Amino acid sequence: MKTAEKNATATLADKIYKNVKMGTDSIINLLPKVSDSNLKTEMTAWLNGYEGYATRAKKLAHEQGEEAKEENIITKMSAKMGMAMNTMTDSTSSHIAEMIIQGATMGVTDMLKEISKYEKEECDSRAIELAREVVEFEQDNIEKMKKYL
């Protein structure tokens, strides 16, 4: 594998990892606020899916000789504080579903930009495919959350 392809693959794998770990953190932060058992079940399944994608992205980065890293602590704390403030006044299933939809939509948008960028570079097709899977997974979950609005 050429160095450019290796670097692009590692970078995309890292971006996928950051994306799904942010989703994981968000769900972990929101789950204690959820009272609807059906919503909690769906969020838990989503969490398991994110963890699977994180493992795959981390492995792909490792194969390129790199280590996938989570977002920096400031970004993570900022998101956590935002969710805490956002649910302080409204922790209804509808509001939590709306927050999840907004976060997942940002994740989808970020992944689509990365896919577009890395399709034009030399990048291992496994990384592109993994990014596409994450987009499809998040889009499917956005649809599932709409029934709680």
Image: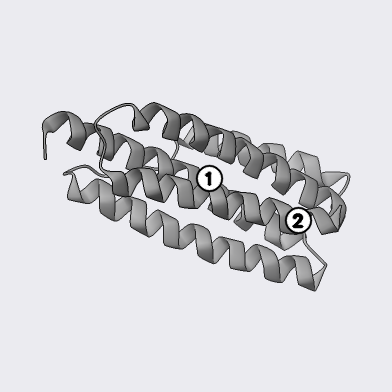
Picture quadrant of residue 43: bottom right
Of callouts 2 and 1, the N-terminal one = 1
Residue depicted at 16% across the width and 44% down the height: 65
State whether residue 74 is above or below residue 55.
above
Residue depicted at 59% across the width and 50% down the height: 138
Residue 22, numbered circle: 1
Residue that mark 2 sits on: 145
Left or right: 125, with 24 as reference point: left
Left or right: 111, with 138 as reference point: left
Which is more toward the observer, 84 or 114? 114
Which amino acid type corresponds to the residue marked 2 in the rendered image?
Met
Which amino acid type corresponds to the residue marked 1 in the rendered image?
Met
Q: Where's residue 130, x and y in %? A: 40, 50
State whether residue 42 is above or below residue 78.
below
**Image quadrant occupied by the N terminus:** top left
Residue 21 visible? The answer is no
Sort mark 2 into few (<14), some (14-19) or many (20+) by Cα contacts within 10 Å.
Answer: many
Residue depicted at 56% across the width and 55% down the height: 137
Element class at badge 1: helix
Residue 137 visible? The answer is yes
Q: Where's residue 57, x and y in %? A: 35, 51
Left or right: 2, with 36 as reference point: left
Label 2 to label 1: alpha-carbon separation: 18 Å
Element class at badge 2: helix
Which is more toward the observer, 89 or 118? 118
State whether residue 68 is above or below residue 51.
above
Q: Where's residue 44, x and y in %? A: 62, 67
Picture quadrant of residue 55: bottom left
